[in-house]
Each structure stands twice: as C-alpha cells, then as structure tokens.
Amino acid sequence: MANIAIIGAGSWGIALAVLLHNNGNQVTVWSIIQEEIEMLKKEREHKDKLPGVKLPEDMKFTNDLKEAAEGKDMLVLAVPSPFTRSTSHMLKEVVKEGQIIVNVAKGIEEATLMTLSEVIEEEVPQAEVAVLSGPSHAEEVGRGIPTTIVVGAKKKKTAEYIQNIFMSDVFRVYTSPDVLGIELGAALKNVVALAAGIADGLGYGDNTKAALITRGIAEIGRLGMAMGGKFETFCGLSGIGDLIVTCASMHSRNRRAGILIGKGYSMDEAMKEVKMVVEGVYSAKAAMGLAKKYNVQLPIIEQVNAVLFDNKPAAEAVKELMLRDKKMEISDSEWQTD
C-alpha cells in the first residue's frame, strides 16, 4: 500500500483518487478551493464534475498543500494544464528530494513551448517526474470501466513502481521511457479533437472524422519525431489511442467545444458552455510555435488556430484543408518504373 496525494480535485483527479483507493492505497485529495474541499467532505461526491461516483469515507480532503504532500510516496498532479506551473511553484517548498510526481494533465505551455513535465522539473528540480496518459475519460475510469494507459518516466524503476501502484483489473498500465512522445501525443490530440468537433458541428459525417483522425495523427507524429519522440509512441496509447477516444466521445470537452464552434459559437462562448478547461485551446498556439521552431507543417492544427483566434469561418477552414496542394500519402516510397 502506498500513501498518495492527488493534487487537484477536478474530474480526472477524483477518478484517479477512486481508482488508487480501490487498489488499496491511502489517498488524500487537495484543492486550492476551500469550498470544493468542504463539499467533497460533506457530500462524498463531486456533484459538479463527476456526479454519481461516490468517495470512500476514509479518503482525506484538504486545501493545505503541505499537509497533502508531506510524507507521501507519490503525488499525482491533476490540475488543468494552465495551472501546472503555478501549482508546481507552490509544491517546490514541500516536495522532498526524490519524491515522485506523476503528471496527468495534458498540454504545452504557450509562453515557453515546454511540455508539462519540463515545467514541473524546472519548478521542482528535486522531484522525480513521470507522466501518465492514454484513452481514459474520467467519467469511465471513475466507474471502473476498463481501459489501458501508459506511464512514462526517465528511469525504468520509477515507471515500474508507478505501474504497480495504478495497475488493476480495469486499469492496465504499460511503461515507456519516451516521456516527450507521450506528452506531445496527449497535448496535440486535444487540438485535433477540436477539429473533429468542429466537423461534427458543421454536420459532416464519419468519413470526415476518420480522415481528421488519420491525418491528425500524421501531424502529431511528424512534429513529435522532429522533436525526438518515438514513432511507436504515436501509434500507441497516448497517440492514436487517446486521439480516437477524444475525437469520438461526448465525454471529451475538446470535442464538445468544437461542436459548438462548428455551430457558430465563438471560442469564448464555447468554453463557457462546456464549463471546464478546454485544454486544446491552450495547446493550439503552442503547437504552431513548435511547428515553426522545428519547421514542420501542421495544416489541421493551423486551421484550428485560424478558427479559434482569427475568426475564420469553420466551413472555410475545412474547404482550405480539402483544396491543399496534391500530396503523396507515403512520401518516401518508390513507384514501379515502366
């Protein structure tokens, strides 16, 4: 049994708290919002973000960060990506040398183009930082519906330790040393999911979505490999696996926001309607910054940016994607000569 703190009481943090408690671990949940902590203590349920998932009586809740982190074997950092740096900065004073932080948020910091694990390592250099990602909507994980994910860490022993803590008969965990690839797949799939949602909002069909998923993973892989990620990672759970579920499910806040934008909502209106942090909006600009830095073309993500930030009509963006210059699908293959 491990003693674990969940830093962040959103839907994903609560779902993982339930999973880890069911695995026999002692779990403490932290939120910076005092009212949220009081509600969780009283209701034993997050009625706003994960209704119907009951929280055990022996699960602890606090808004004291030192109390949450002190003496814990592992911290699970589950705050939305825009708050990763500020929360990590607060953690710096309470995390001990070698203490494990598992980041489960998905995003790229717009101002620095850093992955979230890089942000955490910069703010909390004494920590052992790992990441966890894959097709894993909180609404399903909290109810014990089976899925498979991947944990990435620089050290094999760290990844295997986390694997053992999270693994269960409904939560299969693989390990990988490709931390960068896992994070890029996790962050960029949210931008492609916005595109898939926009297509749904425009009334397009399954063919359109399949095309977006397929060409979307090509873009993610192209950038990811240029940055040093592994091809197998983008074919795996945090690549195509997470992309499929995020583009196809109504649990996906990115897809839901995209649907609203496709129907004519502005970005701000869509985010207010979804009532949760839409991570893809924050990663979209960062993705274009990385594309410029590494000289990689990302046509789908480029059009999503134009719709989000330049008021480009969604239908016009789709038309431009369809009318791009003719391409080969497999660029390094050779034709048979006559």
Image (tube, rainbow, N blue to C red):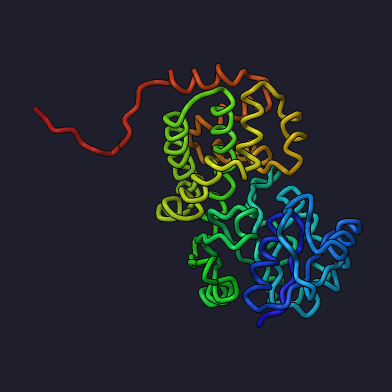
* Residue 90 rendering spot, x and y as whole percentages: 83, 62
Which of these two is toward me, 323 or 89?
Answer: 323
Give the residue at the far front of this rendering: 52
Which of these two is toward me, 259 or 310?
Answer: 259
Is residue 84 at all visible to an observer of this figure?
no
67 vs 122: above or below: below
The image quadrant of residue 305 is top right
| Residue at point 54%, 72% (across, down) | 168
114 vs 72: above or below: above
* Direction from residue 213 to residue 6 in the image, left or right: right
Number of labelled discs? Answer: 0
* Direction from residue 113 to residue 175 in the image, left or right: left
Is residue 239 at all visible to an observer of this figure?
yes
* Residue 41 rendering spot, x and y as whole percentages: 86, 65
| Figure quadrant of the C terminus | top left
Give the residue at the far left of this rendering: 338
The image quadrant of residue 120 is bottom right
* Direction from residue 25 to residue 199 in the image, left or right: left
| Residue at point 77%, 34% (across, down) | 272
| Figure quadrant of the N terminus | bottom right
* Direction from residue 105 to residue 48 in the image, left or right: right
* Residue 165 rendering spot, x and y as whole percentages: 60, 75
| Residue at point 76%, 63% (across, down) | 7
